[in-house]
Amino acid sequence: MIKTDILIIGAGPTGLFTVFEAGLLKLKCHLIDALPQPGGQCSEIYPKKPIYDIPAYPEILAGDLTEKLLEQIASFQPGFTLGERAETIEKLEDDTFIVTTNKGTKHHAPVIAIAGGLGSFEPRKPPIPNIAEFENSGVEYIIRDPEIYRNKKVVIAGGGDSALDWAIFLTNVASEVSLVHRRNEFRGALDSVEKVQELKNAGKIKLITPAEVKEIHGKDHLTAVSIILNKDETIHLEADHFIPLFGLSPKLGPIGNWGLEIEKNAIKVNNALDYQTNIPGIYAIGDVNTYPGKLKLILCGFHEATLMCQSAYKRIYPNKKYVMKYTTVGGVEGFDGTKKEAPKAVVKKIE
């Protein structure tokens, strides 16, 4: 039985930052994640994707953000159960919880923080009949290593932030980048839309709208795609890689059966107070939750984690009064120069 103050389900950026905020309150954390390493989507799906909305970092790669967060929390010595999925939860008579993973590992804590991001997910695939035949030979739904596109002809389909961001990024990697979208309008950030337009004007991106990729061609590897333009014109484009970025289809998994109030595949929380769910002692923070005005941003997850930890402290120590101090005044153990090198996070490895 692994015992801790706050059991965090999900070791993505929000879950990792929760360790820091809890550590300032002298609360211990343990994290469960189905992935074999911390970082969530930032590590598993797009470690080389640049992120632009982290304070003090004009640009930081998703993988580097994970490394910085792990460095930030190392002195608080969190525990990790990796490669296991939180499966069941039991509430005890003393209002604490036991969470058991799919491999039988039990965790006991008075507070549960669900920071599972989008939950388990799979990419949304376009309805192209033979697309499965090329999934290991030219078709990718997730960009993990941009270097495989070095000096290649790349066709990206999609109209959201991922499609725009990767189209911009790959102009400095691929020999040719084409962006195909079924509408003339894009759903992504205005800055990204303007940047794509600038790159199109400079001849660095082929922007094809309104259009859809309807066929892909090749033998052992993708060689071309057929695009329907303006609903009646067909054009053929040479391509080494086709990357449809239509988002992810999220699923809460076993957490959806825990008696939590769910709305549109997300967990409803009380954002007016502390991001607690309908079950006292269970909180949901980051992309996994929903409330009026919710924004699915890493930055918002950090804010939610901060307030959640304050509430968790009051739940664990109802008779204690904690006086919040600025870290610039109180300092952070392990960061004030008086300690030796911070110990590395304790990880429970799963065979």
Image (cartoon, rainbow, N blue to C red):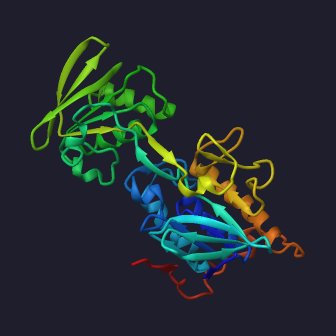
Q: How many marks?
A: 0
- Return the residue found at the far left: 219
| Residue 302: x %, y % from top left | 63, 56
| Residue 216: x %, y % from top left | 20, 32
Residue 246 against residue 89 in the figure, above or below: above
Q: Residue at position x 31%, y 35% from top?
A: 156
Q: Is residue 307 left or right of residue 256?
A: right
| Residue 256: x %, y % from top left | 60, 52
Inspect this view and state whether residue 303 appears. Answer: yes
The quadrant where residue 35 appears: bottom left
| Residue 63: x %, y % from top left | 42, 60
State the residue in front, 157 or 120. 120
State the residue in front, 180 or 91. 91
Q: Is residue 350 left or right of residue 137?
A: right
- Return the residue found at the far right: 319
Residue 280 against residue 202 in the figure, above or below: below
Q: Residue at position x 60%, y 87% from top?
A: 339
Q: Residue at position x 68%, y 66% from top?
A: 112
Inspect this view and state whether residue 324 appears. Answer: no
Image quadrant occupied by the C terminus: bottom left
The quadrant where residue 48 appears: bottom left
Image quadrant occupied by the N terminus: bottom right
State the residue in front, 113 or 146. 113
Q: Is residue 74 left or right of residue 238?
A: right
Residue 81 against residue 130 in the figure, above or below: below
